[in-house]
Image (tube, rainbow, N blue to C red):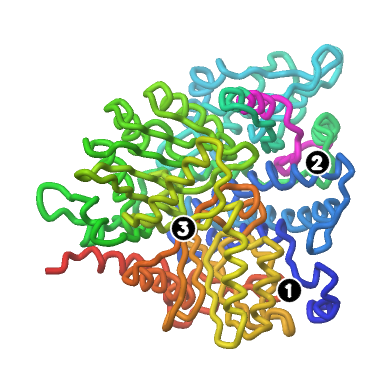
Amino acid sequence: MSIQELVQHRAQPGARFINRELSWLEFNSRVLALAEDRSFPLLERAKFLAIFASNLDEFFQVRVSGLREQLKVGIGAATPEGLTPGEQLAAIRASCAGLVERANRLFADDLAPALAAAGIAVVGVDDLDEADSELIADEFRSRIFPVLTPLSVDPAHPFPYVSSLSMNLATVVRDPVTGVRRFARVKVPPLLPRFVALGNGRFLPLEQVIAAHLDQLFPGMEIVSHGVFRVTRDADVDVEEDEADDLIAAIQSVLRRRRRSAEPVRLEVQRGLSRYSLDLLMRELRLGPDDVYECGRMLDLTSLWSLYDLDRPDLKDEPRTPQTQSRLRSKGSSLDLFAVLREGDVLVHHPYDSFGTVEAFVELSAEDPNVLAIKQTLYRTSAQESPIIRSLIRASESGKQVVALVELKARFDEEANITYAQALEEAGVHVIYGVVGLKTHAKTTLVVRREGSKIRRYVHVGTGNYNPRTATIYEDVGLLSADRELGADLTDLFNTLSGYSRQRGYRRLLVAPHSLRSRLLDLIAREAKPGGRITMKMNSLVDADTIDALYSASQAGCEIDLIVRGICCLRPGVPGLSERIRVRSLVGRYLEHSRIFRFGDPSGASDHFIGSADLMPRNLDRRVEAVVPILDPSLKPRLDEILEVELVDDVLAWDLDGEGHWHKVPTVRGLNAQDRLQELAVMRSVVQE
């Protein structure tokens, strides 16, 4: 049945929604397409292939594991588009099998030969000459052999625990005396470099070095076969929250369980692995044929990051320097950022604008004797060496009241967050962990400053994490302001996060899980008319109520443009349902991460918002999110500029059709939005006389 036919039966959810898991896999396919694009420098293509592989690892650790858990406990309810957990897993298998084959073929037939021609060759043992063989033999004896522990499987030795995402050799040996055949697992040491450098730009994967010397691990035994395998395990964290101290202990306990007892969800094997080894692995890991993915010459393509780190600027994008707006340039010995904000709000757009402006805001606040308090939410950062973390510690040590909300449940960053939370506490910072039952995903900073006989508050509200490393590759926007009502709102928000409060109403902020959903739905309904305009940019669009509201607005005559980097469950361009909705995705050098919402025609009166929330049930209902209106008339055109440039891009953009398929936009003008936004940032940085 076509989508058009399904629309006539709108009671069927599948008529209105695209499955979120399959939509995410379509996004990762777009990342893979960047690795396939020969217009990019070679090491940039290798980087995109590594990102694709890392994305897929996380997808299995979190999304596939969740679906398998639903099957395990007997949950058979269908999702909004009508697929049961079992049906979703079958569809995921079909999609992933094609993606994995495509990635393996890309590396073997295109990237690896091209890199070799450019002087970076990933070689095999068969490619080595006598001198190379002596080099790796010495490397094996001196650095590798001492840390290897072969673990046999026999009646006296049960199958060993295989840690998630570790590289392993499945080895079958035979006793020449008894003829008995045994299986042994050899773990590739994760702390050693993935590649052994042979000189002249040649690199041998570590697992091949080990495989070439298995006779030294099993002296006197015949090596029957060997092959590489990799297991992916469930990495989701589920904790029962209580008081803060108990929360740290609970998460540490969950992390230990994750490392030791998480269920396997995927088995990757090197092409040619013996049937004996494969059957044993499937049996011991309790995985079926649909959980097995056969890979080519090299497992774990995330290791291509180590090749990207090579000093080969000729094979990478030209570096770009983040800019500082002319208004933020120091006119004398130092910039008085507080004075700048008293004159008017500042909008920063990373990575085109320097993240140093945000770091300077916190650093200046830490050093200013008139600042009384600093309060900040920290979801992901770059650990203790972060300039922002150092500034918070200095502020606390100087006697200022410093509050840091650290989200311990930020997936895959739990250990890092525990570490720097403890460091902050040791320095006297008041560390809090948010509201029980909700993740705190808001990106906010509040600074309280004494100015004469009065108190003034300064704020930063952004779309991205306070992480200087990701700020160079994630596209985000942020607002710096001295607006009194916004300062009062953030005061109320932090009081809610740090104490007991039922605060629901705010003057300017839209806060999830209280006012954000209802306000966004009201704004969509307001534009549901002929001449109405809605433009929204986000990472993901999943929420069914929001999608239905957009459908209704489209049917009422509203024109809607959506820029959705990742998951999109809305079907655009369907007659009778969404013919006035257009959806595009930009995938390029920078990860499009900002959330920008515009309601109304920019040529007339329109409302602009930025914030931390995507339009997903988890963000609207189960997280603390902060979305702020942009009220300064001089800043609204900046947001319009971002949206309009991305809507006319024909280099990085993909369009979504009503069947759920993405199509590369034909290149006509050759406008790359990320290049153009960089040019505009450079223009803004020029000091006006």
Is disc 1 placed on a helix, strand or loop? loop
The residue tagged 1 is 659
Magenta stretch bounds = 250-275
Point out the frontmost of discs 3 and 2: 3
- Label 1 to label 2, Cα distance in Å? 29 Å
Q: Which residue is mark 3?
A: 507
| Residue plotted at (32% across, 42% down) | 448
Distance CA(mark 3)–CA(mark 2) = 42 Å
Amino acid type assigned to the residue bearing label 3 in the image:
Arg
Please tell me whether mark 3 or mark 1 is closer to you in this view: 3
Check disc 2 and report its element: helix, strand or loop: helix
Label 2 belongs to which residue? 69
Q: Residue at x 86, y 18 (%)?
A: 180
Check residue 255 for magenta coloring: yes
- The amino acid marked with disc number 1 is Glu
Residue 294 place in picture, x, y as percent: 73, 46
Quadrant including the N terminus: bottom right
Q: Amino acid at mark 2?
A: Glu
> Where does the image place residue 572, in percent across and percent down from the top left?
67, 76
Question: Mark 3 or mark 2, which has the lower sequence index?
Answer: 2
